[in-house]
Image (tube, rainbow, N blue to C red):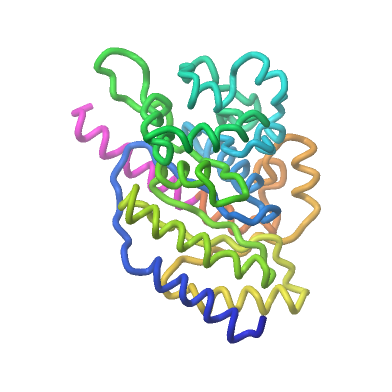
Amino acid sequence: MSRDDRQSAVASASYHVGARRAYVETMTLIIAVANQKGGVGKTTTVVNLAQASAAHGLRVLMIDADPQASLTIYAGADPRALEAEGRTIHHWLLEDRTPDEVIVPTGTGGADLLPSSIRFASAESELLSAWNGASLLRERMGSLVEQAGSGDRRRRYDLVLIDCCPSLGLLTVNALAAAHQVLVPVKTDYLSLMGVSLLLETVERVRARLNPGLEIMGVLPTMYDRRNAHDREALDELIELLGERQRVFTPIGRSTVFDQASVEGVATLISRPEHKALDGYREIVARLTRRTAGERREEVTIDGR
């Protein structure tokens, strides 16, 4: 594919996503971290944003919406054991388990986890046969983010991060229908860049049919090596084609510290907070904490306390 063809494909997508930017006010911010391409850093992004936000005092829930259960494993949980105990997203979403029955405190970083397992792969066919198959996650979300109790509408979480599976099927559509914002990690190579157009077109369809308030939080370049000419060219093209309509965050650098952190089960932002490769994550966490601090002040004013 020529450079002109690549530019045309991405520019077409940017046209579709630039028209509407409605903000949805909510006490709990729900962000889907999505890209139909695997290996672009979705799980690593969720873990780092979740644990760093929790370290700043936010109440955070991570939702593993991927049957591969990478987020569940990263958090130190055993998907097979949780499946046997009936404590996964499948049991909550499709078998009416309560949040208290399925949410797992991770013990590291202060963020809770709604875990997944390979059984969640069957949810795609089960959702196809349900009349609300594209929006079931959104309909059930209230039970996750609100405290239990008669008449008690107080939130239990400030932030929910959904780790989406690498596809654009019903599992990802459910996440987009439930979210207020979508964050798109993109590896800085041309194949990953071309996949962005399809995802952004899917976001536009979800806006039109299911979730008119869905915003694109931004595009997060990942695994970026500034010494590599290919990476630099891909990043320049991404900024050139999407930068005027979508926020392109500071790139996440390519580094072995991410592999080391995953073995430890701790976010790199927690174990190596000053590492230069993490600038993009720090930028996003700063946005999240400022946004939540503002809402907490508003909540105090409304309640009169």
Q: What is the x, y in percent for residue 20?
A: 31, 63
Q: Is residue 72 left or right of residue 182?
A: right
| Residue under the point 57% across and 42% down | 163
Q: Name the residue furthest front.
A: 129
Q: What is the x, y in percent for residue 255?
A: 77, 57
Q: What is the x, y in percent for residue 82?
A: 66, 20
| Residue under the point 62% across and 73% down | 235
On the question of residue 62 being in view, the answer is no
Q: Is residue 247 left or right of residue 149?
A: right
User: Where's the N terminus, which quadrant?
Assistant: bottom right
> What span is in magenta?
286-305
Asked if 249 appears above or below 261 in the picture, the reply is: below
Q: In this rendered view, identify the residue nearer to me: 181 or 67.
A: 67
| Residue under the point 50% across and 43% down | 170
Q: Quadrant of residue 221?
A: bottom right
Asked if 11 appears above or below 200 in the picture, the reply is: below
Magenta-highlighted stretch: main secondary structure?
helix
On the question of residue 125 being in view, the answer is yes
Q: In this rendered view, identify the residue nearer to me: 235 or 53.
A: 235
Q: What is the x, y in percent for residue 10?
A: 52, 74
